[in-house]
Image (cartoon, helix red, strand yellow):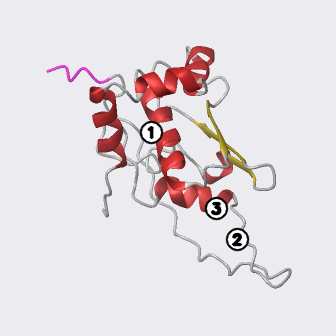
Amino acid sequence: MVSGLINENPVVYERKERRARSAPVETDEYAEDLIDQLEIFDILIQYNIKDPEHPYSLEELKVITEDAIEVDDKQSYVRVTFTPTVEHCSMATVIGLCLRVKLIRSLPSRFKVDIRVAPGTHATETAVNKQLNDKERVAAALENPNLVEMVDECLAPSFA
């Protein structure tokens, strides 16, 4: 029986042990609550964002890793580079949209979010990156009820 999945048997990795966050450093009278790489990673994996095709989280599939996140709090910029499980992943755009939506919902509005496929990891990398970082295309995608339902399902909290 053919399941129709592009990657029927993905490699599944163990989740990393969570590190305790240190308290913000007080520089003046106020504690500065900087957003850093670990905080972005925690936002993306705290509820185990699920892969659209598999019952595994993006962390378990190593689609998203802490090392693939760049943050410049002073410039209000976040870049997340993700790695699809296969070169022809038909869900790469949906995965990227899930990451974008999760960050938009979680970060202060001052942040510019850049979502990218890791170089050389997807057959249509340029097209996927263009779709994920074009405001009009993202807005249009989020008007599609079926796509929004899929994104919401991937983002639904899972405490497994």
Q: Is residue 152 left or right of residue 74?
A: left
* Label 3 crowd bin: few (<14), some (14–19), many (20+), radius 10 Å: some
Q: Point out the residue furthest to the bottom here.
A: 29
Q: Position of residue 43 (x, y in %)?
A: 52, 57
Q: Residues within 10 Å of mark 1 (few under 14, many from 20)?
A: many
Q: Quadrant of residue 19?
A: bottom right
The answer to which of 144 and 62 lies nearer the viewer is 144
Q: CA distance from mark 1 to mark 2?
A: 25 Å
| Residue kind at label 1, given as amino acid type | Cys
| Residue 33 marker | 2
**Element class at badge 1:** helix
Residue type beneath disc 2 = Asp
Q: Along the horizontal axis of the image, is 128 left or right of 60?
A: right
Q: Nearer the viewer, mark 1 or mark 2?
A: 2
- Compute the Cα span from label 3 to label 2: 13 Å
Q: Are marks 1 and 2 in contact (CB under 8 Å)?
A: no
Residue at the right extreme, as displayed: 28
**Image coordinates for residue 17, horizontal then vertical, percent:** 51, 69
| Left or right of residue 111, residue 140 in this image | left
Residue at the disc numbered 1: 98
Query: Which badge, 3 or 1, is on the more N-terminal residue?
Result: 3
Question: Does 74 appear in magenta?
Answer: no
Q: Which residues are magenta?
A: 1-5
